[in-house]
Image (cartoon, coloured by chain):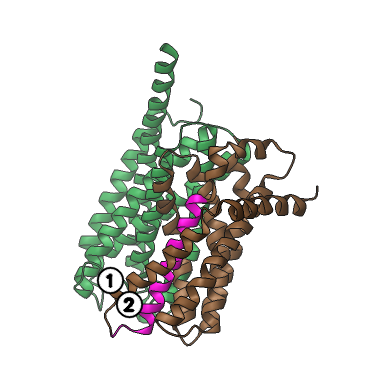
Amino acid sequence: MTYLGDVFALARKDLLLELRSRDTVPAMLLFVVSTLVVFHFALPSDASATAETGLLWVALLFTALLGLVRAFVAEREERVLDGLVLAPCDRSAIWLGKVIGVVAFLVAAEVVALPAYALFFRPVGWELVAAVALADLGLAAVGTLLAAMAAAGRARELLLPVLFLPLVIPIVVGGVGASATDDPGRYLAFLGLYDAVFAILSWASFEYVVTE
Amino acid sequence: MSTSLRNNEHVVLAAAAGCLLLAGTSLAFYWVPNAPVEGFRQRIFYFHVPIALTAYACFGCAAWKAYRLLWTRERRYDLESYTAVHMGVIFGILTLVTGSIWARTSWGHWWVWGSRQLVLFLVLFLFYAAYFMLRYSVEPGPRRANMSAVYTLFGVALIPISFLAIRLAEDLVHPVVFTHDVQNRLTGSQLLTFLVCLAGMLALAGSLYANELTGKRLDARLRELREALQ
């Protein structure tokens, strides 16, 4: 099989698994909506647009974290990763397939989260949608690699947030900047730069994380 | 072991660090004239900035060792990279402390979000503190070495990206000393003091690194021997 064939087979496996078991996405949806409701009560009634946008980004970040913690659970419990590493395919294809799956989950969560945000707080502009799309790629790229690392550790549910949050601070800066300032272009470009740098790094280094 | 410094080299490095730091401290306190705007408190610059640069040097060194580990797959680079991160975190904490003192004397607050360097070091501190969590949570072995190395390499990519992010997010509050603005440029005596302090801090970091590396190697060797005996 070609490289892309491997990638799509792996992504298809993840999506099918989710479609049949419905483990992760419903939880992400409920989580993001309940977080938004919590934020409504956490914010003062005269909160600024920037504060509300910031909280939306916090909600998205933690929703992504929720999905990522689950990303390698099946691989770990059924020892799939050992088999995949032995399979005659490029190891980075495993990463890319997983990233596609994670992005699909994130998009599914945001398809609900953004309208909910528009309903509860304020209308959603194109800048916010563009920023969320770019942020998804970065979150999935970095998160998948770190989730693979954390899956090898003892306290993986604890380890992943600790590894993940310092690395995605720039995404929050870019996302909030793009959706709350008058000049979204710079921030969107920054998000693009972040995606490119960390996607290339993760793609190149995934092999070392899963092999000895 | 072939790469570890011999004992007398440790002593020479430590002595050099001691002399340079003593000289730097005396120069900073007794020789350099007061800065025009900031006055006496500007002298913390001769400690804060060299410490920060030394921390960067440690992180850079750690990333280089990590890269060598992935490239050559030689086990010794794992401990070397780990030790360099360890030193970097120590100097990073010192940067936060000295920066905090400077912020207090300059702006009246212990913590200023407008100070880019401080925020950057906070992010880096969180990032590299998680490195220790990763190491402690994964079983020792080649896979842990690889993961630690990949994580360290992410660190060097994160430094410029975070810097850019903080720059995008912030206003300008931190005094920028290396500018082309004539009034703010370092004078000859200031530059000399700064360089002596920087050399002292680098020598100190090198000396601590060599000592810590020896200790960690002994530790690892001891553990191997203990396992062999059981």
- Judging depth in this view, the residue of B223 and B58 nearest the camera is B223
**Would you call the spot at circle 2 few (<14 residues within 10 Å), some (14-19), or many (20 or more)?**
few
The residue that label 1 is drawn on is B112
Q: Colour of chain B?
A: green
Q: Secondary structure at mark 1?
A: loop
Say whether marks 1 and 2 touch (CB < 8 Å): yes
Residue B217's disc number? none
Q: Find the residue positioned furthest to the top.
A: B229
Residue B173's disc number? 2
Q: Find the residue positioned furthest to the bottom.
A: A182
Q: Numbered disc 2: what chain? A: B
Magenta span: predominant SS is helix
- Judging depth in this view, the residue of A132 and B224 nearest the camera is A132
Q: Numbered disc 1: what chain? A: B
Residue B38 lies, in percent from the top left, at: 24, 75
Nearer the viewer's eye, disc 1 or disc 2? 1
Q: Colour of chain A?
A: brown
- From what the image shows, is residue A84 above or below residue B141? below
Residue A60 within the segment the image draws in magenta: yes
- Judging depth in this view, the residue of A18 and B122 nearest the camera is A18
Q: Give the magenta-colored segment's residue range.
A: A46-70
Q: Residue at x 62, y 41 (%)?
A: B71
**Amino acid found under the numbered disc labelled 2:** Val
